[in-house]
Image (cartoon, grey):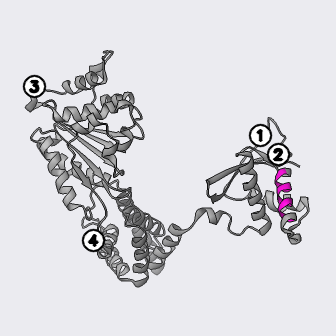
C-alpha cells in the first residue's frame, strides 16, 4: 500500500511541478506581464499617464526610456501596454507598431514593417511615393476615420533606439517626431535605449522636434528589497490549482529566504550586479533541479546554481589538460598571431613547441613526435570545444582532419584556430 501511495504522490507532484515550471519560467523569461514591477513605480506611473493621454485624449507625445541592459525597460513598457489595453475604449482603437534597431537596419525595411503591422499592404498596393515623409503620411492618413478627434491613435515602440540614429539622415526619427509635434494623427513615440548620451546622437533638426521627456531606470533598490524580489519571483500565485501544494511551496521559499547560505549567495549576486536578469538566471538553474522525487527547491540547489553561474566556461574547457597539451595550445596561439588565423599543419605546431623547449631548456617536456601527436592532438579531438570537419575532397580521412579549436580568452578575445592533422 505504501508503494502505491508513493507512486500516486509522485504522479500528483509531477502534474503540479509541470505547472510550477511553466509559471516560473514564463516569469523569469519576462514572457508573462503578470508579475509586479520592482523599484520603478514612479517611472511606471509617468509612462502610463503619457500613454493614456495619447490613447484617450488624442495627445501626441514622445519619450525615451533609458537604462542599462537588464534594468527592466522592456518589462516596463509591456506592463504599461497591458494595463492600457485593458481599458475598453482604448483596446478597440489604439494600434501598436514595434520596431527594433537590430532588425530594421534602414528606413526602407522599417517602412515595410510599419505597413505590415498596420495591415495596410492592400492600401499601399503599387503606389509610388516621392519621399519617405509622403509614404509615412499616407499610411497614417489611411487610418483616419474622419477628423482628428476620431483618428486612430498609434503607439510606436522603438527598441534599440540608438541604432535608428545611424540610419541615413535619421529620416524615420525625423518624420515620427515631426508628426508627434504637429496636429496630425495622434502618435506616441517611445524609444528604449541603454545609451546615456542618446541625445548627442540625434541631429539638430531631429532633436528640436523631440519632446525631451526621459525616463531613467537605474535599479536603485537595496538588498532587503532584493530579498523580497527573490521571494516574490519564486512564490506561486494565489490562483494556483492546488492550494495545499502552493502553501507548501511558498513556505519552502520563505525558509530559503531566511537561510544563511542562501542569503550569502544572494548577497554575492547583489554586490556584483543588481541586474534582475542575473537573478532570474540563478533561479532558472536552481528550478531545473526540481523533479517529482525532489519537489521543493533547497539551499544546495541554489548553491549549485551559483557555481554554474560563476563558472568560467573558457577555463573549464582546458581544465584537466596535461602540461604538454597546454604547451601545444600556447604554440598554436603563437602561430595564430603570426599567420593571422591562417591554417597551419601539425609540423609547424611541433616546430614551435620544439623552439619553446630549446629556449627554456625544459628537457623534461621534450617528447617524441609520435607521442605529441597521439597524446595531444587526438585527445584534443574529444574536447567539447572541437568541431571536426572532414575535407574528403582534398585529403583522405586517414590523412587529415580539420578541427576548429576554441582555445582561451586571450587579450584579443576568443580565438578560433584551424588545424590540419597530417600523418
Using the rendered image of the protein, determine whether residue 378 is visible from the camera's viewpoint: yes
**Label 2, label 4: how far apart the Cα atoms are:** 63 Å
Q: Quadrant of residue 284?
A: bottom left
Q: Is residue 116 above or below residue 158?
A: above
CB atoms of marks 2 and 1 within 8 Å = yes
Q: Is residue 265 above or below residue 184?
A: below
Is 34 within the magenta?
Answer: no
**Mark closer to the chain start, 2 or 4:** 4
Q: Position of residue 281 (x, y in %)?
A: 44, 63
The residue beneath circle 3 is: 146
Task: Rate crowding at label 3 as few (under 14), some (14 to 19) or many (20 or more) other CA atoms within 10 Å.
Answer: few
**Mark closer to the chain start, 1 or 3:** 3
CB atoms of marks 3 and 2 within 8 Å = no
**Mark closer to the chain start, 4 or 3:** 3
| 165 relative position to 3: left or right | left
The residue beneath circle 4 is: 243
| 293 relative position to 355: left or right | left
Is 353 within the magenta?
Answer: yes
**Label 3, label 2: how far apart the Cα atoms are:** 73 Å
Label 3 secondary element: loop
- Magenta stretch? 348-357
Q: Residue furthest bottom?
A: 260
The residue beneath circle 1 is: 391
**Mark closer to the chain start, 2 or 1:** 1
For residue 400, which numbered disc appears in the image? 2
**Label 2, label 1: how far apart the Cα atoms are:** 8 Å
- Observer-nearest residue: 337 or 97? 337
**Label 4, label 3: how far apart the Cα atoms are:** 53 Å
**Mark closer to the chain start, 3 or 2:** 3
Q: Quadrant of residue 204?
A: top left
Q: Position of residue 400 (x, y in %)?
A: 82, 45
Residue at image position (31%, 32%) is: 172
Amino acid at each position: 500500500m505504501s508503494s502505491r501511495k508513493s507512486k500516486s504522490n509522485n504522479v500528483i507532484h509531477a502534474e503540479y511541478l509541470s505547472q510550477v515550471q511553466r509559471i516560473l519560467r514564463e516569469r523569469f523569461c519576462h514572457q508573462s506581464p503578470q508579475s509586479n514591477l520592482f523599484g520603478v513605480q514612479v517611472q511606471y506611473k509617468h509612462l502610463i499617464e503619457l500613454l493614456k493621454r495619447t490613447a484617450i485624449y488624442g495627445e501626441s507625445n514622445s519619450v525615451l526610456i533609458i537604462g542599462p541592459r537588464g534594468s527592466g525597460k522592456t518589462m516596463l513598457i509591456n506592463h504599461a501596454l497591458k494595463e492600457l489595453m485593458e481599458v475598453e475604449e482604448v483596446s478597440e482603437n489604439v494600434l501598436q507598431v514595434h520596431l527594433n534597431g537590430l532588425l530594421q537596419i534602414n528606413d526602407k525595411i522599417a517602412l515595410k514593417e510599419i505597413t505590415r503591422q498596420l495591415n495596410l499592404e492592400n492600401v499601399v498596393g503599387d503606389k509610388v511615393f516621392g519621399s519617405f515623409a509622403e509614404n509615412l503620411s499616407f499610411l497614417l492618413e489611411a487610418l483616419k476615420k474622419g477628423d482628428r478627434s476620431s483618428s486612430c491613435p498609434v503607439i510606436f515602440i522603438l527598441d534599440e533606439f540608438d541604432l535608428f540614429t545611424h540610419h541615413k539622415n535619421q529620416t524615420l526619427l525625423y518624420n515620427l517626431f515631426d508628426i508627434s509635434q504637429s496636429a496630425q494623427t495622434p502618435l506616441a513615440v517611445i524609444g528604449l535605449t541603454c545609451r546615456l548620451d542618446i541625445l548627442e546622437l540625434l541631429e539638430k533638426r531631429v532633436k528640436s522636434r523631440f519632446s525631451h521627456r526621459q525616463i531613467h531606470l537605474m535599479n536603485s533598490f537595496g538588498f532587503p528589497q532584493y530579498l523580497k524580489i527573490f521571494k516574490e519571483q519564486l512564490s506561486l500565485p494565489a490562483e494556483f490549482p492546488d492550494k495545499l501544494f502552493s502553501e507548501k511551496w511558498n513556505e519552502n521559499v520563505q525558509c530559503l529566504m531566511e537561510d544563511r547560505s542562501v542569503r550569502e549567495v544572494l548577497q554575492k549576486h547583489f554586490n556584483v550586479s543588481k541586474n534582475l536578469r542575473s537573478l532570474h538566471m540563478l533561479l532558472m538553474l536552481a528550478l531545473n533541479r526540481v523533479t517529482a522525487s525532489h519537489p521543493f527547491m533547497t539551499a544546495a540547489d541554489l548553491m549549485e546554481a551559483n557555481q554554474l553561474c560563476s563558472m568560467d566556461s573558457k577555463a573549464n574547457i582546458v581544465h584537466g589538460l596535461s602540461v604538454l597539451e597546454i604547451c601545444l595550445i600556447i604554440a598554436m596561439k603563437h602561430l595564430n598571431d603570426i599567420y593571422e588565423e591562417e591554417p597551419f599543419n601539425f609540423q609547424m605546431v611541433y616546430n614551435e613547441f620544439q623552439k619553446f623547449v630549446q629556449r627554456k631548456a625544459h628537457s623534461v617536456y621534450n617528447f617524441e613526435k609520435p607521442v605529441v601527436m597521439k597524446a595531444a592532438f587526438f585527445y584534443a579531438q574529444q574536447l567539447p570545444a572541437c568541431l571536426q570537419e572532414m575535407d574528403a575532397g582534398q585529403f583522405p580521412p586517414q590523412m587529415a582532419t580539420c578541427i576548429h579549436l576554441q582555445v582561451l580568452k586571450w587579450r584579443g578575445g576568443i580565438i578560433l584556430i584551424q588545424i590540419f592533422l597530417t600523418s
